[in-house]
Image (cartoon, rainbow, N blue to C red):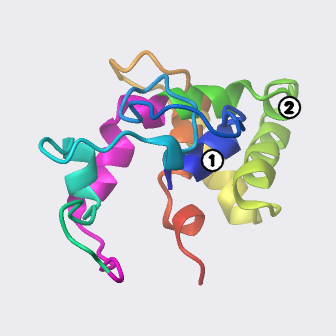
Amino acid sequence: MRDTLLAISGRLELRDGGRPVDITDPQSRCRTVFGLVDRQSLPGTFRAFDFASPDQSVERRSRTMVPQQALFALNSPFVVEQAKGLAARPEVASVTEPSGRVAALYRVVFQRTPSAEEIAAAMEFVSTPKEDSSQLTVWEQLAQVLLSSNELMYVD
């Protein structure tokens, strides 16, 4: 999930090898495989996504979907940073016509053209004034909504 969000935002660092990094840092762009795992103190993010115990041999991770995972997508500084990156991608930010920008977001995130209903809903979203203290533009907020969607994370 983390690598997908970084790749879609255009921020995934493709390096070969190196030292482990703190992947809970919202500014970290390394692939998750380079994440440092402290066996004594697992970050809350790891626990929210049912990270396997690093002290045991685990054949297969259990698959779960719990509210904490959705709340992570809505509140995480990491996801907010990726939403900003997605909204700033040249193929999105350079489109001046709003419905064209919505279509560009859908192409980058879902690799498809949005339906007429999806365009209408997104246009209503970006045109409705928001009382939000997040300091995100409406396009960054829409990008965050798309990055938090089930369609991005699960294959039907």
Q: Give the Cα distance between marks 2 and 1.
A: 13 Å
Question: Residue 150 or 56: which is nearer the viewer?
Answer: 56
Image spot of residue 105 (x, y percent) = 74, 44
Say whether residue 5 is magenta.
no
Residue type marked 2 = Glu
Q: Quadrant of the C terminus?
A: bottom right
Residue 75's x, y, as percent? 31, 37
Q: Is residue 34 left or right of residue 17?
A: left
Q: Secondary structure at mark 1?
A: helix
Q: Quadrant of residue 13?
A: top right
Disc 1 residue crowd, few under 14, some 14–19, many 20+, Cα 10 Å: many
Label 2 Cα crowd, 10 Å radius (few <14 / some 14-19 / many 20+): few
Q: Which residue in the structure is indicated by mark 2? A: 97
Residue displayed at 32% across by 55% down: 70
Where in the figure is residue 152, as x and y percent of width and height?
58, 62
Residue 140 in the figure: left or right of residue 107: left
Regarding residue 101, the answer to whether it shows in the image is yes
Q: Which residue type carries mark 1?
A: Ala
Q: Is residue 123 among the parts visible in the rendering?
A: no
Dot 2 falls on a residue whose secondary structure is loop
Report the span colored magenta.
Answer: 59-80
Residue at 80% across / 33% down in the picture? Answer: 92
Between 6 and 147, which is closer to the camera in this rendering?
Answer: 6
Q: Give the residue number, with chain letter if any, for mark 1.
A: 122
Which residue is rendered at x = 68% and y = 64% of the image?
117
- Seen from the viewer's position, the closer of residues 133 and 156 is 156
Tell whether 106 sits left or right of 121.
right
